[in-house]
Amino acid sequence: MIKIGTIFKKLIKRFQSEKVRGISWLQNHRNSHLYKHISEETLLSSKKSNTVFIFGSGYSINDISQDEWKYFEKHDTISFNWFVYQKFVRIDYHIIKEIAPNDLDSSIWHPKFNEYSKNIAENPFYSKTIFIVQKGWKATGGNRMIGLHLLSKNSNIFRYYISYRGKDRLPTFTFSEGLSHNGTLSLCINFAWIMGWKKIVLVGVDLYDRRYFWLNQKETRDRDMMRGASYKDQHNMSKVTVPLMNKWRKFFIKNNVELYVYNSKSLLAEVLPVYLMK
């Protein structure tokens, strides 16, 4: 039997969550016009190759050589979330979804958002990036980035919806359908599929531990400590991502698209071919 106190706490949290969403949505609505929003046509015409590299934030990023980074830059590049710490490679598209571990506590989310925007503003590798920012009622992070002026007003921005159609869903075919979400990585891959790249390569998506390239080798990220996890543990999305990417690989094969993983030690190497530079 569910206790009344438990139900009440859930209702309070739900009310707080909806209130926060409402505030961020209004802020976005008020200030969205200050930014340059590119059209879908302009976005689709911006890619310059048939191959795209998507960068995760696993510790294996530190093992990539300068020659490899230069090779990546000959093609198109996508990053997401906290890859903004990097000083390695030009980023053509950056997908904004997860920024703070808590959207309700301003003592947590506010400094995280400020740090995030500062990393972008001071990073020359993001000077010509197109920012792919979530929109809609549930897009608290994306709405805050726009509503609180946390991106440069000179930024090129494209807004996307998330498609909520249950777990293990396949990629959507158009931006109007929204991007299929089962972790931010799936958003990036769905984005790459709609954009029309024929080879999609996942770099720094390790999953075998929770180490991140900007931290010390044996340092646990604050978000993982909040979950009671250690840097030694498998990534919290590993059990979801590996079978999902196996399913998506089969979908892409049928549609003449190749999905690769770059790190041969990644858990994804169990289901995806390893990309070799030519």
Image (cartoon, rainbow, N blue to C red):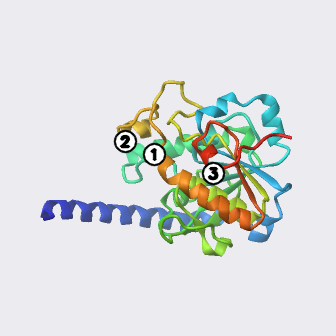
Which quadrant of the rendered structure holds the C terminus?
top right
> Where does the image place residue 156, in percent across and percent down from the top left?
73, 58
Q: Is residue 153 above or below residue 263?
A: below
Instruction: Please tell me whether mark 2 or mark 1 is closer to you in this view.
Output: 1
Could you say whether the residue bearing mark 3 is in a helix, strand or loop? loop
Kindly identify which residue carries mark 3.
151
Could you say whether the residue bearing mark 1 is in a helix, strand or loop? loop
Disc 2 + disc 1, Cβ < 8 Å: yes
Label 3 is placed on what type of residue? Leu
> Where does the image place residue 207, in percent across and percent down from the top left?
54, 41
Is residue 37 visible in the rendered image? The answer is no
Which quadrant of the rendered structure holds the N terminus?
bottom left
Instruction: Please tell me whether mark 2 or mark 3 is closer to you in this view.
Output: 2
Q: Is residue 258 above or below residue 32?
A: above
Kindly identify which residue carries mark 2.
227
Numbered mark located on residue 236 in the image: 1
Q: Sequence order check: which comes first, mark 2 or mark 1?
A: 2
> What residue lies at 60% left-to-right and 70% top-to-bottom?
178
